[in-house]
Amino acid sequence: MAKKQTEEYAQTEETMDESEGGMSDLNFDVNDEYKASPLIPGGTYHGSVIKVAYEPAKYCIVWTFSLHDNGGVMSDGETPVDGAHVFTRNWLPKPGDETEMTGSGRNTKRQSKINMLMDFQNALGIDMSTPKKIGDALSNAEWIGVEADLTVSIREWEGRFSNDVTKVTKSRMY
């Protein structure tokens, strides 16, 4: 094991010399150039679905919305809100959820996830009632282009700030 680590270190040393791709080709200063990613101010924005993907390892559907027809700029005062992408997830019931309770102890995780799916499909005016219908819609890209109003907030996690979609409803604009 020690020999392998030594060989890896030696390979790293070679890339630090004057040859192509070496450290001498690089020019940056993290301390001078760091700039926090701009955030979308909290509020309701208009957007459309540009991507919907199933993540089997997490038992979720990830929705990507592109914001448009909003105007305004992000927290840096210069980056336009329009054109920004925001994400939200639908958590699908997975094996074992039928016996595990939610944090409140009111429902099983399965029932809670089914209830959230019902709320989401009703709010967006789509059909997510069965895995087959979801799979067919994903395969046929049926939800691409759906217009929505999105409530966006700013959240902090482990000292880092990001945008979070807290509510999705069918757009009243289109």
Image: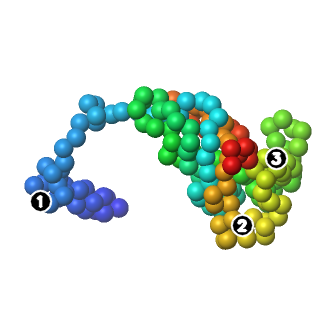
Image-quadrant location for residue 78: top left
Give 40 or 20, whichever is nearer the viewer: 40
Residue 108 coordinates in the image, percent (x, y): 86, 47
Q: Looking at the image, do the residues carrying marks 3 and 2 touch, with CB atoms under 8 Å apart?
A: no
Q: Which residue is mark 3?
A: 119
Give the number of callouts.
Answer: 3
Mark with earlier residue (3, 1): 1
Q: Secondary structure at mark 1?
A: loop
Q: Mark 3 to mark 2: distance in Å? A: 18 Å
100 vs 114, nearest the viewer: 114
Q: Would you say 112 lies left or right of 26 here?
A: right
Which residue shows up at 11% across the image and 59% down it? 19
- Which residue in the rendered view is the most extreme toward the left? 18
Q: 142 or 131: nearer the eye?
A: 142
- Across and down, in percent, residue 57 comes to 64, 60
Q: Which residue is tagged 2?
A: 137
Label 2, label 1: how far apart the Cα atoms are: 51 Å
